[in-house]
Amino acid sequence: MNSKTQNKMAIGALYGIAGFVVLILLALLGYILISGTPQLSWHFLTAPAKAFLKGGGVGVQLFNSFYLLFLAMLISFPIALGAAIYLYEYAKNNWLTTTIRTAIEILSSLPSVVVGLFGFLFFVVKLRLGFSILSGAFALTFFNLPLLTRSIEDSLRTISETQREGGLALGLSRWETVTKVILPAAVPSILTGVILSAGRVFGEAAALIYTAGQSAPALNFMDWNPFNISSPLNPMRPAETLAVHIWKINSEGIMPDAKAISSGSSAVLVLAILIFNFAARYLGKRLYKRLTSA
Amino acid sequence: MLTSNDVRDDEAMQERHVTQLTDVGEDIILSTHDLHVFYGQHEALFEGDLQFANHKITALIGPSGSGKSTFLRSLNRMNDRIATVTGQIMYRGVDVNQPAIDVYEMRRRVGMVFQRPNPFAKSIYDNIAFALQLRGVTDRHQLDEIVETSLRQAALWDQVKDELNKSALALSGGQAQRLCIARAIAVKPDILLLDEPASALDPVSTSQLEDTLLDLKQKYTIIIVTHNMQQAARISDYTAFFNAGRVLEYDTTSQIFTNPQVKITSDYVSGNFG
Ligand SMILES: Nc1ncnc2c1ncn2[C@@H]1O[C@H](COP(=O)(O)OP(=O)(O)OP(=O)(O)O)[C@@H](O)[C@H]1O
Ligand SMILES: [Mg+2]
């Protein structure tokens, strides 16, 4: 066999594999969207769930998902940003940074159910936060932090060393160089990473089942005082998210339309994550264009 | 001046010819004494005793890896985190190679332009203005004025004056390099260090850049690393020839190119090696 045919065969095999992967993805997406979208309606997206009767919605779950996402990002982004800046811009390569990097590596490959159980033992039980948004947000932070840190570090890595030298040569301190030169240039790529990780957090269930809990008490959307128990903003209330809701219905749902609700919720979840992904690409590209052209 | 360095050079049995510019009556703005640079254990510069004349252009030439960049980057302490630099760097009578020196202030006096143009991901205007703003220049008129004069000095003003808010990343290589020069002179340095500033540029941009440097000589002292012999001959007043981490010859540019004293220098400038 000469190298030409060999090459052709290799390319053929790779195309085959790639096609197969795309096919699986399309089949999954297609199945979820086709069975789920017919259930979608304004009522479904806004009404509270019903435990025994037909016609429940996922309004509260949807809100919980976004609220948890927001809180988790609020906590994890500054920490991840600081850690990434420290690791990439300041730290020398020594045993300490090697240890930190290894820790991040391990943390990022922990199964999320382990993160969930840890969150349960530590936040829910030990710190007495109970099944609450706060416990959930902390668990999500643990889940998200390593990946986000690495993604921001990668973003910093894409900014050429010559930019740093340019800043330093103007008499800027390292901090000024990082904040005024490097970070602005890295914003498009950091933003993309943040949105992609938001998608991951949004669809996370295992880390939340034992932290944010599996119940979604009715909320009073007129009450925005975070100290009231029925206020949507109250961080101490249990909060089942959309992903947890799907898991719950499928394992123990007893409403008559459980199947339809589960399909509808899945479609909402998948759509939201698709939107996150496309938004990430679009915003990243647009910002980059803004930076590089007129 | 007899230092331990002289002894070492005798040991190396190097043929050398380094002119002391004070002997020819030059006004010295910057000089190095017994400068050694180590990358870890690896010594990349063994001896750097050079004097730089005020408002003159000095070219640093020599084969690849001979230590030109290493030497240049030590002058404004850009090697601080990368290498160990020992010896003295006297700038207007002050040794700037000591820990107590405010290195940020010092780098504003000794600006640098790099081989690859590195405009920031900001507008043309902000590329020049933002370092000034960080230093407390907030008056809009004053900023406008500095941006304009810097761009004029770098011979870029006429091309960009109508699109100052455009991203600097959209400039051509030659324009970007001149923006980097404008950015460097906006903070009002005394000395400009340039490391092969034209090596990424086409011949036309290169000759424009050379004209710009000749203009800038009125106001600044320029030290430029170049691989281009014609460039060194065209624009510089003095030339230092580096080889294997040592300055082997230092003299007026015409002397170096027409009547080099050291065999290796003459081989190099006549293109026989390097
Ligand atoms: N950051 C660094 N770390 C370790 N060694 C280095 C570093 N930079 C340069 N060196 C070494 O120092 C020596 C001199 O390099 P330098 O870059 O100063 O040469 P140069 O004369 O500028 O060469 P060129 O003409 O190719 O730019 C070389 O042996 C090089 O390998
Ligand atoms: Mg070099």
Image: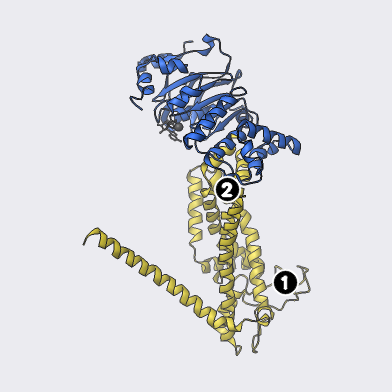
Task: State the residue lying farthest toward the left.
Answer: A1
Position of residue A189 measured from the top left corner of the image (x, y, whole percent): 56, 54
Q: Nearer the viewer, residue B158 or B273?
A: B158
- Please state the total of marks drawn on the protein image: 2
Position of residue A35 measured from the top left corner of the image (x, y, whole percent): 54, 83
Crowdedness near tag 2: few (<14), some (14–19) or many (≥20) residues, C-alpha within 10 Å? many
Label the yellow chain with its letter: A
Horizontal relation, residue A11 to residue A21: left or right: left
Q: Which chain carries label 2?
A: A
Find numbered disc 2 in the image and state the secondary structure of the residue it sits on: helix
Note whether residue A129 is visible.
Answer: no
Q: Mark 2 points at which residue?
A: A85
Q: Mark 1 points at which residue?
A: A232
Q: Residue at x 56, y 39 (%)?
A: B176
* Type of amino acid under label 1: Pro
Horizontal relation, residue B125 to residue A252: left or right: right
* Type of amino acid under label 2: Ile
Q: Mark 1 lies on which chain?
A: A
Label the blue chain with its letter: B
Q: Residue A25 carries which label?
A: none
